[in-house]
C-alpha cells in the first residue's frame, strides 16, 4: 500500500477545477483549516492535501491507536504529513482532544464527514464541533478521480488508477462560531453534506 501511494503521487495529476481562490486565501492566512471530504474519496482528497505540504500547510490525519495505526503513522511520516493518534469510533472524546490540540499547534487535520463507518454520505457532527472548539474554518474538498476501481464496501470506496487525474473543487472556508446545542451542530452538518455533494459533482463533471 505504501508503494502504491508513492506510485499515485508520482503518476497522477491534480487539477483544481473550482474554488482555487479559496485555497489561495487559506494558504495566505497561514492559519490552519479543517479540510473535509467524503470517505469514498479518501485517496484523491488525501493526496491533494499532501500536495499542499509543499505550499506550507501542515497537514494531519487521524490515525487509530492500533498496530495497523502504527504502520499508517510510519507511512504518514514518509509522506511528510502528521499522524494524530486517536479513534473517533472507540475513543471519540480523546480523539477530539487530540484534534483540537493539533489545530492549536498549527496543523490542518483532514476529516471525513461520514467516516469511519458511515452511513455513506451522511455528514456527522465531529468536524463541526472541531471547527467550533478550535476556531479553524471548515474547508470542503470535493474530489473525483478520472479512472478508478470501486470497492464493494459500505461507502463504495474508490481506488484511483495510476496515471489518472484528480479533479478538486473547493468550498469557501466556513468559520463555525459557538454551538448552542447538538441540534445546531446537526443542522450545520446536514448543510455541509449538501455542499460537499455539490462540490463532488462539480469535480466529477469538470471538463478533461
Image: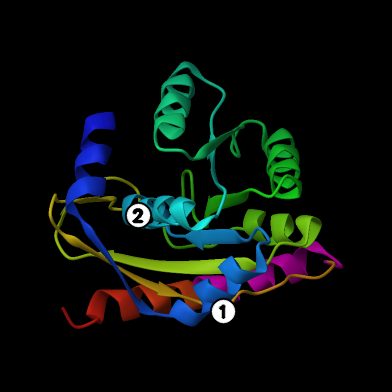
Classify mark 2: residues with Cα within 10 Å, few (<14), some (14-19) or many (20+): many
Q: Which mark is residue 172?
A: 1
Give the mark nearest the N terminus, 2 or 1.
2
Q: Nearer the viewer, residue 185 or 207?
A: 207
**Residues tagged 2 and 1 counted as in contact (Cβ below 8 A):** no
Classify mark 1: residues with Cα within 10 Å, few (<14), some (14-19) or many (20+): some
Residue under pointer 2:
40
Give the left or right position of residue 20, taking residue 189 as reference: left
**Whether residue 151 can be seen here:** no
Q: Secondary structure at mark 2?
A: helix
Q: Kindly report the secondary structure that dominates the magenta region of the rendered protein.
A: helix
Query: For residue 60, which quarter of the picture?
Result: top right
Q: Position of residue 36 (x, y in %)?
A: 52, 60
Q: Residue at x 71, y 37 (%)?
A: 98
Does 185 sit above or below residue 93?
Answer: below
Q: Nearer the viewer, residue 103 or 178?
A: 103
Give the left or right position of residue 180, taking residue 86 as reference: right
Q: Position of residue 66 (x, y in %)?
A: 52, 20
What span is in magenta? 179-193
Q: Residue at x 15, y 59 (%)?
A: 164
Query: For residue 96, which quarter of the picture?
Result: top right
Please state, as top left, top right, bottom left or bottom right, where the C terminus lies in the image: bottom left
Q: Residue at x 26, y 47 (%)?
A: 9
Please state, as top left, top right, bottom left or bottom right, where the N terminus lies in the image: top left
Q: Nearer the viewer, residue 204 or 14?
A: 14
Q: Residue at x 59, y 58 (%)?
A: 124
Query: For residue 145, which quarter of the picture?
Result: bottom left
71 within the magenta span: no
Foreground: disc 2 or disc 1: 1
Q: CA distance from mark 2 to mark 1?
A: 21 Å
Give the left or right position of residue 48, taking residue 67 as reference: left
Does 131 sit above or below residue 59?
Answer: below
Amino acid at each position: 500500500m505504501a508503494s502504491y501511494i508513492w506510485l499515485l503521487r508520482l503518476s497522477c495529476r491534480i487539477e483544481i477545477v473550482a474554488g482555487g481562490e479559496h485555497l489561495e486565501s487559506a494558504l495566505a492566512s497561514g492559519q490552519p483549516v479543517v479540510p473535509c471530504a467524503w470517505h469514498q474519496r479518501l485517496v484523491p482528497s488525501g493526496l491533494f492535501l499532501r500536495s499542499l505540504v509543499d505550499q506550507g500547510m501542515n497537514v494531519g490525519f487521524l490515525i487509530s491507536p492500533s498496530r495497523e495505526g502504527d504502520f499508517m503513522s510510519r507511512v504518514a511520516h514518509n509522506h511528510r504529513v502528521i499522524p494524530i493518534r486517536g479513534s473517533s469510533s472507540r475513543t471519540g472524546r480523546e480523539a477530539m482532544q487530540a484534534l483540537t490540540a493539533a489545530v492549536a499547534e498549527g496543523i490542518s487535520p483532514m476529516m471525513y464527514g461520514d467516516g469511519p463507518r458511515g452511513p455513506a454520505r451522511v455528514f456527522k457532527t465531529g468536524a463541526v464541533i472541531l471547527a467550533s472548539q478550535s476556531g479553524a474554518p471548515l474547508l470542503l474538498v470535493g474530489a473525483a478521480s478520472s479512472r478508478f476501481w470501486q470497492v464493494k464496501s459500505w461507502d463504495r470506496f474508490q481506488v484511483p488508477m495510476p496515471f489518472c487525474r484528480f479533479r478538486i473543487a473547493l468550498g469557501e472556508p466556513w468559520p463555525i462560531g459557538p454551538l448552542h446545542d447538538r441540534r445546531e451542530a446537526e443542522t450545520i452538518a446536514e448543510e455541509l453534506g449538501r455542499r460537499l455533494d455539490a462540490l463532488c459533482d462539480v469535480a466529477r463533471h469538470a471538463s478533461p
